[in-house]
Amino acid sequence: MGGGVTERLPEGSSEPLLPTKREGGGGGGEFAGAVFNLSTTIVGAGIMALPATMKVLGLAPGLVAILLAALLTDASIELLVRSSRAAGAPSYGAVMGDAFGWWGRRLLQVCVVVNNIGVMIVYMIIIGDVLSGTSSGGEHHYGVLEGWFGPQWWNGRFFVLLVTTLVVFTPLACLKRVDSLSYTSAISVALAVVFVIITAGIAIVKLIKGQIPMPKLFPDVPDLASIWELFTAVPVLVTAYVCHYNVHPIHNELKDPSQIKPIVHTSLVLCSTVYITTSFFGYLLFGESTLSDVLANFDSNLGIPYSQMLNDAVRVSYAVHLMLVFPMIFHALRLNLDGLLFSSSSPLSSDNRKFSVMTAVLLLVIFLSANFIPSIWDAFQFTGATAAVCIAFIFPAAITLRDPHSIAKKWDKILSIFMIVLAIVSNVVAVYSDAYSMFHRKSSPSIA
């Protein structure tokens, strides 16, 4: 990964990356732009499900779990970057290929494709919930457009998502470089901060007025099934921090590649602050009524002045945030799918026809899926317990244990074993708990 030159790839291989350097000059990424791009990759839809994890885990263990997930993410990216430098690998796929050969590279690409398709379906579901309303919890929560204009044919879910896909997602998805998105990323991070500030402000006002009851600090575990249910929060926490597939493209566009470490640290501190604030105040505000998509809670009277205006501001700002995050995740999805399906053909950036067809097909698949999958919790449970946990923890740890260039220290290997065991055990239990709940017709405590 290191160095300021474009690394030459092994003959016959094709990486799921756009050109590693801008033609005719050095990398174009600046520190702030890189922080915004990485932060945008991290703070996506996961933030909406985090208050529901507080409901599952209790406030104290929930906030500790968010910090632990951030520390483990930082450690796993550090392991990944170090292995990439030793291998001279310009992408996550290349370093997996260096450690595990052809099948390692392909396995990573499959995981990124599954994770990113799942995450972008979640984005569209949330945008649909915000603008058109949702009835996934059994009770109808109206959307912003429905609240403003009443139920109309043009503010139904299908039509709203169709217009959003054609007018917003398609133009942004057609940009070919990651740093072309740094301005939209900066706006999206600002909108996420607006969401956090408004949510925190509402909760503080209600707290001062004495309108908020004491939140649950620790989980209720009356039986064994309740213990299993605690683990259903793990895939959501894992998904919340997955950004590993965009570390290399961002690194490759930096003028000074050594900046990647402070960029990762800055992004994780920023995102952890946003996550902790949202989880704390979101759960404080709605308590045991917290839905799996906390945005859906912002459709009722909050018991404070200008409640309706603040509700709409929270929901609209976050819907726009997700619209602007979408192309960052889509960028990595398209590149990895290209590497998976067309590994021996010309690079994606130089083949306009393939670029256009792949973009159109992926947008269509995501759009149709978002119209048929009802809840974001279901999508997070699947992607978080499978693809996301592999990308974030299992693969970086496995590369370190394989250690083809003999650079790993003893502590690195101990940490890697810990990561793999923790990831596998917690996610197997989470999947088991979901299956148990399904078969016993007992809904997850995170879904109202």
Image (cartoon, grey):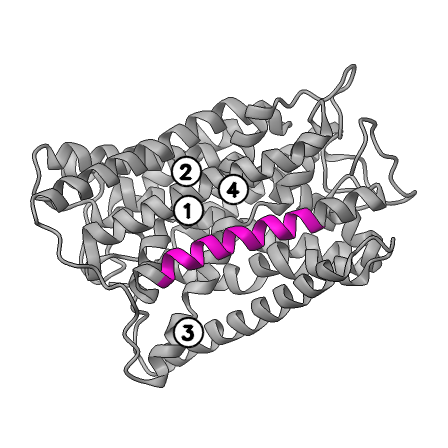
Which three-letter amino acid code belongs to the residue tagged 1?
Answer: Ala
Is residue 152 visible from the viewing direction of this image? no
Q: Position of residue 43 (x, y in %)?
A: 45, 42
Front-lying residue, 421 or 290: 421
- Tell me the mark number nearer the camera, choosing from 4 and 2: 4
Determine crowd level at label 3: few under 14, some 14-19, many 20+ residues with C-alpha closer than 10 A.
many
Residue beneath the point at 56% across and 57% down: 388
Q: Residue at x 72, y 33 (%)?
A: 18
What secondary structure is found at the residue carrying circle 3? helix
Per the image, is 74 magenta? yes
Between tags 4 and 1, which lies in front?
Answer: 4
Q: Are marks 1 and 2 in contact (CB under 8 Å)?
A: yes
Task: Identify the magenta region.
Answer: 61-79
Which numbered disc flags the more N-terminal residue, 4 or 2?
Answer: 4
**Residue 190, magenta (yes or no):** no
> Residue under circle 3?
434
Q: Tell me the element at label 1.
A: loop
Disc 4 to disc 2, C-alpha distance: 19 Å
Amino acid type at image mark 4: Leu
* Distance between mark 1 and mark 2 Cα atoms: 7 Å
Say which residue label 4 marks.
268
- Per the image, the residue denoted by label 1 is 45
| Rendered location of residue 6, percent (x, y) | 83, 29
How far across and how far down the image is residue 28, in percent? 67, 20
Viewer-side label of 4, 3: 4
Three-letter amino acid code at disc 2? Leu
Q: CB atoms at circles 4 and 1 under 8 Å apart?
A: no
Q: Quadrant of residue 406?
A: bottom right
| Residue 127 falls left or right of residue 324 | left
Q: Residue at x 74, y 48 (%)?
A: 93
Q: Earlier in the sequence, mark 4 or mark 3?
A: 4
Mark 1 residue crowding within 10 angstroms, few (<14) / some (14–19) / many (20+):
many
